């Protein structure tokens, strides 16, 4: 992730946030591409259910060598323990209110932020069974699939999100990234980004989108249609 990430990890101790933020930053830089959340969510620790106010977005970052320091600070086990601790009061509420979609999404957010993507997928999926038109949660579900290496499921969920909100700029941006980097479908990526700019002329990431479109346009026509096997 990048320094533009808006943390959804609310209610955690300062040490926990620093640890998770450092690990997420390192992982994002090492991967070259990271999908960030642009959501501002209510604090799950406050005892209130969080309400999604914005969808996820993708942030492109330069590739760089990974640091081993992150593994020394917090590994997957420690991140899982942190998430379990933070999710505990939410899970307690869920036992008495099992069909609260905002509560389910809040739990999914906790595990998403701790990089426990399969668990996040479980709670996002449960949320969407109750609230299928929530394009923001569906976009987060798609990004979780992307982090799990499942580009096809990510694209399917982005497309479903667009059924409910066809001009959502962040969903379109994400869809373009996954088509480009996950499926080698430059033409499909360009289509998504052109739709984004046409519907959202004041999109805050307009310059970035235009640069990526220019990069795609430099590629030979045949390579733009290539699909990953």
Image: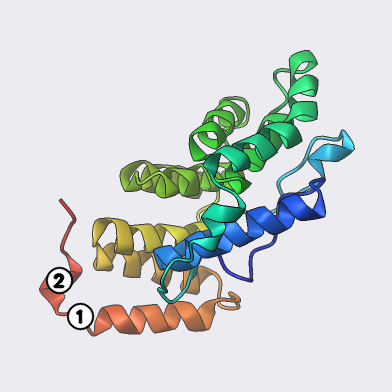
Question: Quadrant of the image for the N terminus?
Answer: bottom right
Q: In this view, does 127 lie above or below 185?
A: above
SS at badge 1: loop
Q: Which residue lies furthest to the right in this view?
A: 46
Does any portion of residue 56 appear in the rendered image? no
Question: In the displayed structure, would residue 213 be above or below residue 164?
Answer: below
- Quadrant in the rendering for residue 221: bottom left
- Which mark identifies residue 6? none
**Where residue 218 sits in the image (x, y, percent)?**
23, 85
| 131 to 167, vertically: above or below | above
As drawn, which residue projects farthest toward the left? 222
Q: Are marks 2 and 1 in contact (CB under 8 Å)?
A: yes
For the residue pair 73 and 79, the one nearer the viewer reads as: 73
122 and 71: which is toward the camera: 71
Q: Which residue is drawn at 53% across and 48% down?
A: 139
The image shows residue 111 at horizontal and vertical percentages of 61, 39
Residue at left offset 14%, top offset 71%: 223
Quadrant of residue 115 within the rendered picture: top right
Identify which residue, 13 or 135, lies in the foreground: 13
The percent coordinates of residue 97 (x first, y second) are 77, 18
- Label 1 CA crowd tier, 10 Å (few <14, some 14–19, many 20+): few
Lateral position of residue 135 relative to residue 92, left or right: left
Choose between 196 and 205: the one closer to the eye: 205
* Rendered position, 188 above or below 194: above
Q: Which residue is drawn at 65% across and 59% down?
A: 21
Helix, strand or loop at mark 2: helix
Q: Residue tagged by mark 2? A: 223
Mark drawn on residue 219: 1
One can see residue 186 in this view: yes
Q: Name the residue rendered at 68%, 39% in the picture.
A: 82
Crowd class of label 2 (few under 14; some 14 to 19; many from 20; radius 10 Å): few
């Amino acid at each position: 992730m990048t320094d533009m990430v808006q943390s959804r990890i609310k209610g955690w101790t300062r040490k926990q946030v620093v640890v998770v933020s450092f690990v997420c930053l390192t992982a994002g830089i090492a991967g070259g591409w990271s999908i960030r959340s642009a959501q501002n969510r209510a604090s799950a620790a406050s005892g209130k259910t969080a309400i999604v106010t914005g969808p996820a977005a993708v942030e492109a970052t330069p590739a760089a060598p990974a640091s081993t320091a992150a593994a020394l600070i917090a590994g997957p086990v420690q991140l899982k323990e942190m998430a379990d601790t933070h999710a505990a009061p939410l899970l307690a509420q869920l036992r008495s209110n099992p069909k609260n979609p905002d509560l389910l999404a809040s739990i999914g957010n906790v595990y998403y932020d701790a990089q426990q993507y399969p668990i996040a997928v479980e709670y996002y999926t449960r949320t969407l069974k109750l609230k299928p038109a929530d394009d923001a949660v569906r976009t987060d579900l798609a990004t979780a699939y992307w982090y799990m290496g499942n580009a096809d499921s990510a694209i399917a969920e982005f497309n479903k999100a667009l059924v409910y909100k066809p001009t959502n700029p962040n969903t379109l941006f994400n869809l373009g990234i996954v088509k480009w980097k996950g499926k080698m479908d430059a033409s499909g990526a360009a289509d998504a980004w052109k739709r984004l700019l046409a519907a959202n002329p004041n999109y805050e990431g307009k310059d970035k989108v235009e640069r990526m479109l220019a990069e795609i346009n430099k590629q030979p026509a045949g390579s733009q249609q290539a699909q990953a096997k």
